[in-house]
Amino acid sequence: MSNEKRWRQLGGGSFFKFEDVGQVLEGIWRGTKAGKYGDNGVVEVFGENQMFTLNAALRDLVTVKPGCEVRIEYLGKKMAKNGNEFKAFTVQVSEDAEITEHEDSSTEAPF
């Protein structure tokens, strides 16, 4: 093999873990990418993709059009009414961000 070939890395970027309360991930929303354990969100920060687990608290991000600015703040672990612990977040988008309607799959077709 020749060393003159130009190579590019697939799946570039690093994995971002929300661990500390108040931790913020802010950048350009690039959409989702299938991961080993489900979908991951992708935010571009200073030209580098940061991937993170798209848990239930962050699923509304799929309604944001790729290319829009987003800000995700980790609020810490909270307790649900049923006693389960979950990670809580505040998700914000820029004022000019385009949001698509999230289809509700629970509604039946009218025929």
Image (cartoon, rainbow, N blue to C red):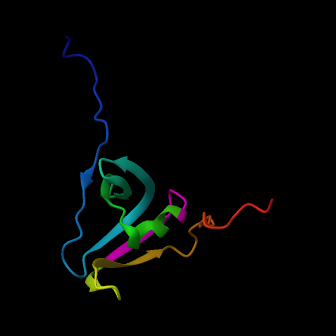
Q: Residue at x 44, y 66 (%)?
A: 59
Say if 63 sits above or below 49 in the image.
Answer: below
Magenta residues span: 63-73
Q: Identify the residue at the far bottom of this view.
A: 81
Residue 109 point in image, percent of width and height: 73, 60
- Which residue occupies the foreground of this view, 55 or 63? 55
Residue 61 point in image, percent of width and height: 47, 66
| Quadrant in the rendering for residue 90 | bottom left
Q: Identify the residue at the far top of this view.
A: 1
Residue 39 point in image, percent of width and height: 38, 54
| Quadrant in the rendering for residue 10 | top left
Magenta segment: does it hold 70? yes
Q: In this view, does 18 lie to the left or right of 55?
A: left
Say if 100 sits above or below 94 in the image.
Answer: above
- Which residue occupies the foreground of this view, 108 or 33? 108
- Location of the N terminus (image quadrant): top left
| Quadrant in the rendering for residue 55 | bottom left
Q: In this view, does 103 lie to the left or right of 42?
A: right
Q: Residue at x 28, y 23 (%)?
A: 6
Q: In this view, does 80 lie to the left or right of 21?
A: right
Q: Residue at x 29, y 43 (%)?
A: 12
Q: Identify the residue at the far front of this view.
A: 111
